[in-house]
Image (cartoon, coloured by chain):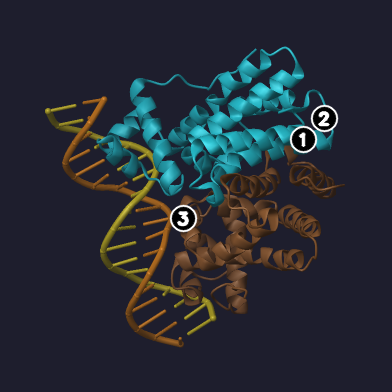
Chain colours: A brown, B cyan, C orange, D yellow
Amino acid sequence: MTLTPSTDLSVAQRRTIAVALELFARHGVGGTSLQMIADELGVTKAAVYHQFKTKDEIVLAAGEAELAQLLPIIEAAEAQRSVRKQRQELLAGMVDLAVDSRRTVRSMLGDPALIDFFNHNEFFRDVMRRLRHLLVGDDHTPEARVRPAMLIAAISGAVIHPFVADVDDDVLREELLRLGRRFLGLPG
Amino acid sequence: MTLTPSTDLSVAQRRTIAVALELFARHGVGGTSLQMIADELGVTKAAVYHQFKTKDEIVLAAGEAELAQLLPIIEAAEAQRSVRKQRQELLAGMVDLAVDSRRTVRSMLGDPALIDFFNHNEFFRDVMRRLRHLLVGDDHTPEARVRPAMLIAAISGAVIHPFVADVDDDVLREELLRLGRRFLGLPG
DNA sequence: GTCTATAGACCGATAGAC
DNA sequence: GTCTATCGGTCTATAGAC
């Protein structure tokens, strides 16, 4: 059984979220006001409030939209027959997603209030559970918790690190794959 | 030649920063007001403004204080004679610091405005340069930029990941060391 | 160095016309 | 679904007394 994000969004709502994500990435969640979102959309605050009842709803929906990008990657990985192929598929997908997103991933992971909220979010917990299962199987030892945390942090954190600011996307992707494979003990 | 943080701080200023760091960790930088800092210190906002002219100054000083904790670690590593020992020493120090800081590290890395600021900060750039030199020497290829970025992100990101929220400090430390060594191709 | 008091801007959110 | 207008509250920052 697969959970999906908790709400279906209209086209207008999707545009609002896209704008919000870009602003979150530039100014942080707490540093982004509804006025800024409205300005970027070319409407007034009241129009934004017609789409979402509160700012929290926007933040939540934005976080879920980011998270939802992991779903097809997880599903593609789960469809593989061997554990090794599952992990290769997952790694490749995560690297692609991180490189493509580069700027937008960061802000979500950094906001303490948001992290706290997501820890109690059913959809988030489901995605993380499946991610972890792909990476370490049924192992529930502390060690098996640290390894996926490190891999996720390494990939999503490395793409925004100043060291790689002017590294070409393709080069970055290839290198992340190579180092990620080594980290997971995969061939290649 | 070694750069140091740009200001010498009074005792009162240090206490202000300690309080600020704790609040940043709990509520994010943008979510922490001067009122909250003043309340926690048991004084009024005006008294805080006597210590620092603006909120930005507090944020900057807090960031520098965090960063400065890396200095003795870097120096200890640089003092080692072989490259392998340098990297072992650096890894151990970074892991210790990350685990000890756990709660406070997160907020600094998550705020885009802060990251952006630090990218243009002389002290920050010097610390990063020395970190990178320890990890990859004089190699300036793209690959040599991605590897340290991944290691730094992996360690500092892993300690704040929900997966390891209830992993014991000692276990976390040991596991980060083990995986970090593998990532760097170090023995042990 | 700490206080009270306040300025002035911006915040999230709402009411009600069109 | 977008607007104008506005509410109450909080924000950073300052003035000036003690």
Q: Are marks 2 and 3 on the same chain?
A: no
- Between disc 1 and disc 3, the foreground one is 3
Residue A39 appears in view:
no
> Label 1 marks which chain's residue?
B
Residue B171 appears in view:
yes
- Is the N terminus of chain A in the top left, top right, bottom left or bottom right quadrant? bottom right
Q: Position of residue A74 (x, y in %)?
A: 70, 64
Q: Position of residue B4 (x, y in %)?
A: 55, 19
> How many marks do you count on the picture?
3
Q: Are marks 1 and 3 on the same chain?
A: no
Q: Which kind of residue does numbered mark 2 sit on?
A: His
Rate crowding at label 3 as few (under 14), some (14 to 19) or many (20 or more) other CA atoms within 10 Å.
few
Mark 1 or mark 2, earlier in chain:
2
SS at badge 2: loop
Depicted B129 relative to depicted B82: above or below = below
Rate crowding at label 1 as few (under 14), some (14 to 19) or many (20 or more) other CA atoms within 10 Å.
many
SS at badge 1: helix
Residue B85 placement: quadrant: top right
Q: Nearer the viewer, residue B128 or A18?
A: B128
- Is A171 displayed left or right of B22 in the figure? right
* Tag of residue A116: 3
Rate crowding at label 2 as few (under 14), some (14 to 19) or many (20 or more) other CA atoms within 10 Å.
few
Task: Say which residue appears at 72% left-offset and 12% top-offset.
Answer: B81
Q: CA distance from mark 1 to mark 2?
A: 7 Å
Residue A158 placement: quadrant: top right
Q: Position of residue A20 (x, y in %)?
A: 57, 62
State if disc 2 and disc 1 touch (CB < 8 Å): yes
Q: Which residue is mark 2?
A: B140
Q: Nearer the viewer, residue B43 or C15?
A: B43
> Label 3 marks which chain's residue?
A
Q: Which residue is mark 1?
A: B145
